């Protein structure tokens, strides 16, 4: 792990300083030569000389994230896609073979297909089906890339089974844990080799910056660190400090948002709407959710059957804000068909379960009653939350009109 931090912050400060220096001095020429000779090494202990390699504020964030995820090491990057790029490029080479689901974040899907031009074999399969995943992996694989929950369909992957099949074929399992955060799911403990995060989302939680992270063993993170060095993809110290500040409230935000998302999904499903959330008993991967992410996630989906109905519903919302992203303190609504996944071929989207009527809802920390009232009031035919309605694990909620 990056070791540029002093044991205690200067002046007894509760928070680490923001070190805005691009370059660092060394006591003599011999020490400078030593630091350059070991720059980008596996342990990240070369000593400070240039902030594209290491920075004390970035190192403070990396150490905190490694503790959260239970990882030996961590690198922070300039965005979530930067993290995925550094992780994969550190593991792949021309002729390598990678298995992934077609239902992943749109830019991840694009990146995977760009790898084909670089000579990487990209195999797509339904990773939520252990049998199909094992078949796609076959007897030899280099990397299996997993999103669980998947974006935006919320299908899940049995990470233990995926790790077992991947390792049996000599490969490495990389898991995007952005939707859950380390509080709700621990991929490394379930057998993953590397975890990636878009820190932009739940870990920062305030929708005010871009950042990413790669976490895992020292040896594997070192490969990503080396790629980050040459790509210039390190996080800047000011942003690192803000992510670290956001992470201090992670538990409060995640527990509130995840519980509200589950509650809303239950209430909508009880009214016959096509709501989906991993903790709903009707979810096809509910058993997997209860085994590996019982705290759930802050995202649910609602399928309104047509693009026109989805757009109408979104335009009527007053509390939910129309924007992409997720995991912030505010509630957001997006339409994957026309935004985040619009670059995917239509046949691929439909095969992955991304339909024109699908709306993705990221639940924040607003009063859950306000959010449910907002959703119900946005529908063409407003359901009535019946006084006697019963949903598993949550008491019926009386929805009062929102105050002007």
Image (spheres, rainbow, N blue to C red):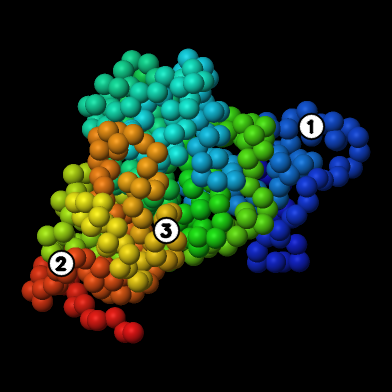
The answer to whether residue 255 is seen in the rendering is: no
Which numbered mark, 2 or 3, is in the foreground of this view? 2
Residue 36, which numbered label?
A: 1
User: In the picture provided, is 94 more to the left or to the right than 58?
Assistant: left
For residue 323, the mark is 3
For marks 2 and 3 on the same chain, the one whose residue lies earlier in the sequence: 3
Outermost residue toward the right?
28
Nearer the camera: disc 3 or disc 1 = 3
Q: Relative to the observer, which residue lies in front, 236 or 193? A: 236
Circle 2: element type: loop
Q: Is residue 114 above or below residue 184?
A: above
The relative height of residue 160 versus residue 236 in the rendered view (above or below) is above
Residue 241 image position (x, y, % from top left): 63, 58
Quadrant housing the N terminus: top right
**Quadrant position of residue 14:** bottom right
* Residue at x 85% of width, y 35% of height: 32
Q: Which residue is mark 2?
A: 381
Q: Kindly check if marks 3 and 1 are in contact, taking CB atoms under 8 A apart as contact.
A: no
Locate residue 48, reporting x and y percent. Answer: 77, 43
Question: Is the residue marked by circle 3 packed among few (<14), some (14-19), or many (20+) residues within 10 Å?
Answer: some
For the residues labelled 2 and 1, the Cα–Cα distance comes to 66 Å
The residue drawn where x is 75% and y is 54% is 20
| Residue 90 in view here | yes
Q: Quadrant of residue 3?
A: top right
Q: CA distance from mark 2 to mark 3?
A: 24 Å
Seen at 62% across and 55% down, the residue is: 239
């Amino acid at each position: 792990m990056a070791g540029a931090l002093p044991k205690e912050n200067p002046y007894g400060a509760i928070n680490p300083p923001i070190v805005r220096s691009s370059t660092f001095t060394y006591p003599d020429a011999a020490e400078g030569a030593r630091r350059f000779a070991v720059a980008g090494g596996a342990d990240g202990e070369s000593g400070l000389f240039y902030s594209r390699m290491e920075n004390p504020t970035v190192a403070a964030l990396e150490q905190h994230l490694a503790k959260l995820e239970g990882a030996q090491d961590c690198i922070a990057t300039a965005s979530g896609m930067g993290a995925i790029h550094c992780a994969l490029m550190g593991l792949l080479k021309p002729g390598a073979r990678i298995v992934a689901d077609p239902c992943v974040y749109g830019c991840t899907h694009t990146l995977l297909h760009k790898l084909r031009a670089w000579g990487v074999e990209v195999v797509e399969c339904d990773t939520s089906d252990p049998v199909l995943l094992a078949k796609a992996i076959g007897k030899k694989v280099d990397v299996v890339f997993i999103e669980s929950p998947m974006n935006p369909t919320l299908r899940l992957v049995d990470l233990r089974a995926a790790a077992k099949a991947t390792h049996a074929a000599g490969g490495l399992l990389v898991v995007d844990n952005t939707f859950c955060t380390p509080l709700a799911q621990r991929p490394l403990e379930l057998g993953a080799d590397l975890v990636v995060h878009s820190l932009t989302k739940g870990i920062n939680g305030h929708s005010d910056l871009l950042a990413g992270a790669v976490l895992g063993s020292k040896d594997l993170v070192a490969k990503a660190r080396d790629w980050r060095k040459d790509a210039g993809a390190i996080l800047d110290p000011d942003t690192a400090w803000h992510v670290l500040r956001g992470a201090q409230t992670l538990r409060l935000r995640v527990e509130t948002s995840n519980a509200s998302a589950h509650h809303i999904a239950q209430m909508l499903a009880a009214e016959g709407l096509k709501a989906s959330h991993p903790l709903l008993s009707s979810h096809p991967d509910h058993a997997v959710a209860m085994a590996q992410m019982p705290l759930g996630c802050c995202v649910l989906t609602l399928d309104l059957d047509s693009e026109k109905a989805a757009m109408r519903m979104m335009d009527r919302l007053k509390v939910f804000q129309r924007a992409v992203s997720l995991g912030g303190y505010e509630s957001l609504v997006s339409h994957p068909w026309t935004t985040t996944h619009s670059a995917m071929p239509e046949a691929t989207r439909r095969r992955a379960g991304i339909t024109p009527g699908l709306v993705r809802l990221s639940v924040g920390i607003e009063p859950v009653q306000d959010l449910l009232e907002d959703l119900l009031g946005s529908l063409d035919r407003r359901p009535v939350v019946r006084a006697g309605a019963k949903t598993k694990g949550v008491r019926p909620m009386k929805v009062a009109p929102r105050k002007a």
